[in-house]
Image: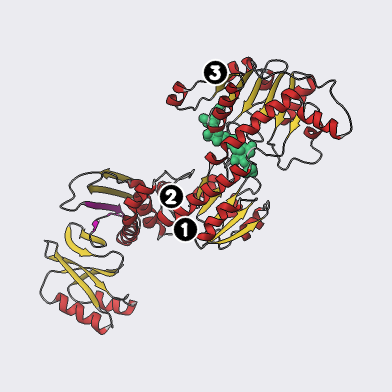
Amino acid sequence: MKVLACDGIHDDGLALFRDAGWEVVVSDPIKDPAALASALDGVDAVLVRSATPVTAEAIADATKLRVIGRAGAGVDTIDVDAATARGIAVMNAPDGNTLAAAEHAISLLFALARHIPKADAGMKAGQWPKAGLTGFELEGKRLGVIGLGRIGATVARKALGIGMEVAAYDPFLPPAAAAKGSVPLKTLDELLAWADIVTLHVPRTKETTNLLSEARMRAIKPGGYVVNAARGGLVDEAALLKLLDEGHLAGAALDTFVTEPLQADSPLRAHPKLILTPHLGASTSEAQQAVSTILARQILDFIDTGAVAGCVNLPPLTAEAAREVGPWMPLMSALGRLAARLVPAPTRLHITYAGRTDALDTRPLTRLLVASLLGTASGRITPVNALAEAAGRGLTVAETLGGDGDGFDRLLRIRVEGDGRSREIEATLHRGPRVVRLDGVEIEFDPLANVLLMRNEDRPGMIGTVGSKLGAAGVNIVNFALGAAGDGQARAAITIDRAVDDAHLAELRATPGVLSLQQI
Ligand SMILES: NC(=O)C1=CN([C@@H]2O[C@H](COP(=O)(O)OP(=O)(O)OC[C@H]3O[C@@H](n4cnc5c(N)ncnc54)[C@H](O)[C@@H]3O)[C@@H](O)[C@H]2O)C=CC1
Ligand SMILES: O=C(O)C(=O)COP(=O)(O)O
């Protein structure tokens, strides 16, 4: 397995990959999508920070890539939709840098309040720049937090600790979190009119782009301040310069920019009321160590056990739940392949998880079954894109939980329909993966083995005739399971030690009494 680590990923996380036997390739940021595409050749996982954009073009031919890992919080530099469509999991590690980002925002508040950068620059230039650098106290001032998630809530807590009044705007806060929080919530208009300093802690999305537009910044009290240590593009940079020039805003501090690195000739660099840092929010050794190790563990667990944590395009699956469903995974893949052979153009799939269903998270099982059912048709289908791909291809997927397990601890009943056909497979785990019934007829076989499925006239001599033809083809029978279908026909599942070639298959199909024969 191979991981490509771009953008300066802390070595502690990379060591976990090396310990697990992975090849680790370390790279500087790769800005060019074509260059990233070629660097991704043969790569199973790629790790990035904010410098390397992972675009649709970069991953279009990444046939081995299973995970894009963001060693940090914001996934706005990753084309998550394109990754999902290609069946690639996208993971991040937002808990690892919350403190670092929050402390950076607080640092910027102090830097603004006490002119620290100007004071320092003057001192370094041989001056004693005391006059003109009178600041203001943060205690008693009003801080308006936009986005009360991990970082916003941490900033709020720290700001309360230094005696600031704090309120927030976050329309997506879960009601429980809003109810127990010590930070009053306001509408955006109320917050902007109330705050002395507005600080942003939202992700960059279509909705949050230019959240602080010219009109919104005008709604901040004259003499107010803006801090953006969240994402470039949340603040309209041109409008900010205008409002600083007009004197409507007294100052602003930016850690993140529309274009990064910021252009050398950007007018932002020259503005005396602006404090700039080069996207340093997450740049503490603690945060980098944390995000790299959290992310590495998430990716290694996902690949090794199927456990899902910190994934933005798959539902979570705890290690315990992964252990519970793990043994069923090979069965789901095999049943998907079998179902695809029985009904090549499926339009409806109904899965019943019967018997004991407690502690069974069926989501990864259903996704894998669907991926395997569709995967044989074309393209790259994985549990990440299986359900979307099913919807796109007109396959309805339904699931029933519970019901009689027919004496089995757990029994899977899979009905596939399409093209006028309707087939039913019942399967379980019993000394390995086992199909126990096909279309209601009791025949047992291992769906992972080489199997011939036969429908034949229910008359004496059939086993012998087919058996000797297989013998003549040099194929050994491992198991011959036969069940009467009740209509003068029988069904057989013949487990064999190797695949039968086409010529011998044709000969078997031509055997009198054989009504149909399929190799799976
Ligand atoms: N400067 C830096 O180095 C760093 C920047 N960040 C940025 O900070 C962002 C937030 O990180 P976390 O707090 O960990 O994420 P989070 O997901 O815990 O919090 C984001 C909050 O924003 C809220 N939100 C979303 N859309 C909103 C909208 N339109 N208006 C108001 N609130 C909205 C959400 O409800 C959520 O509570 C990241 O997405 C990233 O862009 C994160 C780490 C470091
Ligand atoms: O985690 C985030 O969202 C960040 O913005 C941190 O960016 P970085 O990893 O320092 O390039």
> Where ligand 2 lies, by quadrant?
top right
Q: Position of residue 154 (x, y in %)?
A: 56, 29
At label 2, the amino acid type is Glu
Q: Is residue 358 above or below residue 212?
A: below
Q: Is residue 137 above or below residue 376?
A: above
Identify which residue is drawn at 44% across, 21% down: 179
State yes or no: discs 1 and 2 in contact (Cβ < 8 Å).
Answer: yes
Mark 1 = which residue? 379
Question: Crowdedness of circle 2 by 10 Å Cα count: few (<14), some, many (20+)?
Answer: many
Q: Is residue 376 above or below residue 251?
A: below
Secondary structure state at the residue bearing disc 2? helix
Q: CA distance from mark 1 to mark 3?
A: 48 Å
Q: Position of residue 182 (x, y in %)?
A: 50, 20
Closer-to-camera residue (443/379): 443
Please say whether residue 292 is visible from this viewpoint.
yes
Mark 2 = which residue? 389
Closer-to-camera residue (237/462): 237
Question: Crowdedness of circle 1 by 10 Å Cα count: few (<14), some, many (20+)?
Answer: few
Give residue 484's mark. none
Q: Earlier in the sequence, mark 1 or mark 2?
A: 1
Q: CA distance from mark 1 to mark 2?
A: 10 Å
The magenta segment is 410-429
Identify which residue is drawn at 80% across, 32% down: 120
Q: Main secondary structure of the magenta part?
A: strand
Closer-to-camera residue (122/456): 122
